[in-house]
Image: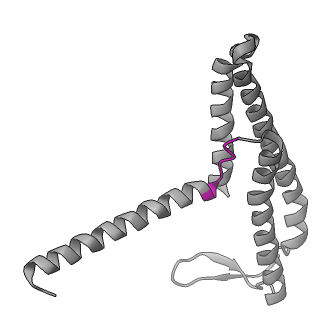
Amino acid sequence: MTIHFGMILLETSIAIGVGIVLFPWSLVRSTGFLGEAVIGWLAGCAIRVLILAVLLAAAFPLFTTIVPPASVGTTFVDPMSGVAFPAMAPSMGETFGVVVGAMLFAFLVLIIPARAARLMAGPALALSGSDLLAGAMTTFRFTLAGTRIIRGTSALLTGGI
């Protein structure tokens, strides 16, 4: 989620920088479309940041109600590391509730701002962490395919096949 938030901030910074350059072009009638596109992009970025801020503001009350309170009192000291842990762990139901709540919230934070920006701005970047990971996975796939081609060619030339 941190990657996603960073991508939103990066896109907003890029939109502001591009807006400073392209917004004056909206004063000329024949190049007015450039300024209009930048205004739409900035509006989409602002909507994404606003929605993300609202979701993060809703996270604090949500997680204070789902997360079980820490047990106060006796502690268990790990003999290997010397770290003190609470003596009473949360039940399996409480743990499952925290996991489901965190996964639901992560889904909401990843999906809702991008969809809102696409609805608001039309052709906008709407970058997210999934775009960054998709690029990394594509690079890995091509690297893996290239490695297999080189190994297969090497084995063929040395007579290993």
- The part of the image, by quadrant, that contains residue 43 is top right
65 in magenta: no
Residue at image position (63%, 40%) is: 10
Q: Which sits in the foreground, 108 or 116?
A: 116
- In the rendered image, residue 103, in percent from the top left (x then y), is placed at 76, 71
Magenta span covers which residues? 124-130
Give the residue furthest to the left: 158
Quarter of the picture holding the N terminus = bottom right
Quarter of the picture holding the C terminus = bottom left
Q: Which sits in the foreground, 99 or 136?
A: 136
- In the rendered image, residue 7, in percent from the top left (x then y), is placed at 63, 46
- In the rendered image, residue 41, in percent from the top left (x then y), is placed at 74, 34
Q: Which sits in the foreground, 47 or 82?
A: 47
Relative height, residue 49 to residue 157 (above, below): above
127 in magenta: yes
Residue at image position (29%, 74%) is: 148
Relative height, residue 131 to residue 161 (above, below): above
Q: Main secondary structure of the magenta part?
A: loop
Residue at image position (82%, 72%) is: 101
Give left or right: position of 114 versus 129.
Answer: right
